[in-house]
Amino acid sequence: MNALPAEQSLPGKVLHEESYLREGFTLRSWLLTRDHKRIALLYMISITGFFFLGGAAASIIRLELLTPAGDVVDAETYNKLFTAHGVIMVWFFLIPSIPATLGNFLIPLMIGAREVAFPRLNLASWYIYTLGGIFVVITLIAGGVDTGWTFYTPFSTLFSNSNVVLAVMGVFIVGFSSILTGLNFIVTVHRLRAPGMTWFRLPLFVWANYATSLILVLATPVLAMTLSLVAFERLTHIGIFDPALGGDPLLFQHLFWFYSHPAVYIMVLPAMGVASEIIPCFARKQVFGYRMMAYAILGIAIIGFLVWGHHMFVSGQSMYASIAFSLLSFLVAIPSAIKVFNWTATLYKGSISVSGPMLYALGFVGLFTIGGLTGLFLAATALDVHLTDTYFVVAHFHYIMVGGTVMAYLGGLHFWWPKIVGRLYPENLARIAAVTIFIGFNLTFFPQYLLGAWGMPRRYHEYAPQFQLLNEFSSTGAAILGIGYLLPLGYLTWAMLRGARAPSNPWGATGLEWETPSPPPKENFAVIPRVVRGPYDYHPSGASAPSGASAEPQA
Amino acid sequence: MSAGLETPLQAASTLGTTVDVLFLTMLGVTGAVAIAVAVCIGYFTIRYRRSSGADRSNPPSRVRWVEVTWTATPLIIFLGIFLWSSAVFSQFYRPPRDALRVHVLAKQWMWKVEHDNGRREIDTLHVPVGRPVELIMTSQDVIHSFFVPAFRIKQDVLPGRYTSLWFTATRSGHFSLFCAEYCGTSHANMGGGITVMPQAEFAKWLASGPEQAGLAARGFEIYRRVGCSGCHEPTSTVHAPGLTGLYGRPVHLSDGSTVVADETYIRDSILQPQKQVVAGFAPVMPSFQGQLDEDDLIALIAFLKSRARPP
């Protein structure tokens, strides 16, 4: 998608004098910024902090599970650790991860806008996120919470002796930052597209974040209401969920999963968007079946609202409800399958270079495929009866959310790092890290499929001795995975300060974000570009951009 | 997590074997897809690496028949697996009529089991091989889940209602029982074992228990003691619905609806009598909330079942 009169920055041109990074160096200029790019960086720093905090909890969990006996921490601490891990990773890392950082930074650039629609709300969203985060940190300092991230009633409302209300408030608050981000993206995509940027010229990354935003806006309020009711029952003892008070515990599960299943798509759709940018670029080929990809994104977002009951096949809900939810869950797998086939077909007759971002993107496709296929086992009622609440489920959603989303997030960070900080990351280290993460991830989570199929329940602080060997593999993998995650933290930070200067378009990529300097000026574009063709105008045999706006890839 | 318990790979129940066939088929189908995707990605990445001179003429960006094929094929396979799985799943909800009924009460953090003849056990369940067993389960506090991996069965156990589960064990042995729904601090230790024994041995075991009145007899004693009989006996002068033959029968309610008198209905009628008033009767029954514990309710229900009319 090349623009006609966009500012023509030359390949190799050094850091632009008027980049958004140079618009003030004080703390105040960052904390009061309304620039979507700076807010993206604020988010990036915050979620990185929470990622490693959640990761620390995971490390202790894996250390504990090295042996069948509960010898590292006691049962209560273990329960608080997996709760903290879940709450932090889901709401304070995964949900904001790609949308609030890469989405915030890139959506205006990709559609040729100078800003998001509501810059002040965008900043408010980050402050609300931070406030929610403070609540969670206070919860941890006050002694933690032991309900699991799912807050199942009536355990959470009347039986747990931990800081449930504090934790629930943290999640309640952070939900509003999600809603504001979603609202902002929806209006931005509708109203601020550059001339010529029609809906079917939008990069798939924008489509994915648009669909994600719809889910954020529609589903998050249900979570807010549900968690309010949990706090209400806990504080007033007025029966909502506890049958002893006249409530219904399954009502909670219906409400909770009505949000939390779509939330899975909040976490994975943006990752699909990232992969859909990286793969065509390094295959030098137009994405296969662009329209089908866009429809698949919307299909997943819509059907994703109708499958929540597949978390409840053994909960005591009606058999007919379970069968209906099973059918819908099989149906939602179809657009996901289409996407995997399309990414694969994009490689056919391409001109492929296996750079760092490409390794991450291909890793994403592989792990997402395994995660998606094992999801079919769980969609099948008769199999889910045995597999639900075992390590099979733990493995499945980690393949989707960690194997899938985190891999794609890291791929996206590498791909756009030159754009974000104006400097290149060290390519060899990136490749080593991608391979390390891939190996570490599989070693950690593949054994968990076997454990689950064998019958090991999740959330067990101690376990039967026959499960030990596979748990040892898993814990070893976790150590490798941890090292893999620390590598990019190190070299990307180094690259930000010391890396070689990046040209405006180091990959020879299409997309408006590559037609403005790296890093972009505060207003993004000197002249708002006029879009004359669709996205992914790559050609395997030659340069991608006939307008000459792009450089040859340097990696 | 006592030793000597089996969590075998091979299913030890009739339904479990059916589930395993489905599982292995699913593994074959998904495994084939995963391998095909991996082979394609690997092959394309090598063949079309930038330095190769492979033919790249006319790279496709959209091929209608390919897209239709790879949408329709999974759809058909998925629908097939869905139908198969649903058929198996519906068997989980159809316990044989001659199933041996056992009551299970879950609480933080133990499983209390009571057989019809009054024999009780904690964290163990003895059952005969080759005979269907139906568990009627409820919880005294939070949600638990009764999980026997060897039988491929799992069912959440909820407070305030009864859920059930059935299986027919196919071989003798000791099998792990786990709580699969997170239920608080000692969740990981809320386990036990299922002991499957030959039928004759089981009959002997059942009879040799500590001398105790049968469950229904105990229920009858409670029925007299707390005063149910004062109103519900046919000879009573109070206008109250009769209870003989109640269990399993449809009941017409004053709001015009009809419910089947199952365990949960009977329980609710005792604890929250105003919730579902029988058509034609005044809502005069007091609640017995607080006077009866879960064990008493199980006994009362067993007593009412024993008064069910023969089918």
Image (cartoon, coloured by chain):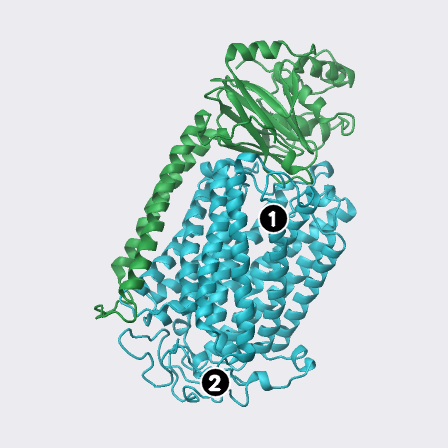
Chain colours: A cyan, B green
Residue A513 relative to residue A34: left or right: left
Q: Quadrant of residue A530?
A: bottom left
Q: Which residue is mark 1?
A: A63
Classify B185 as above or below A275.
above
Residue A17 relative to residue A283: left or right: right
Q: Which residue is mark 2?
A: A517
Q: Residue at x 68, y 80 (%)?
A: A27
**Residue type highlighted by circle 1:** Leu
Q: Residues within 10 Å of mark 1 (few under 14, many from 20)?
A: many
**Residue type highlighted by circle 2:** Pro
- Is residue B143 visible in this depiction of the protein? no
Residues flagged by tags 1 and 2 on a common chain: yes
Contact? badges 1 and 2 (CB < 8 Å) = no
Q: Secondary structure at mark 2?
A: loop
Q: Nearer the viewer, residue A432 or A215?
A: A432
Q: Quadrant of residue A237?
A: top right
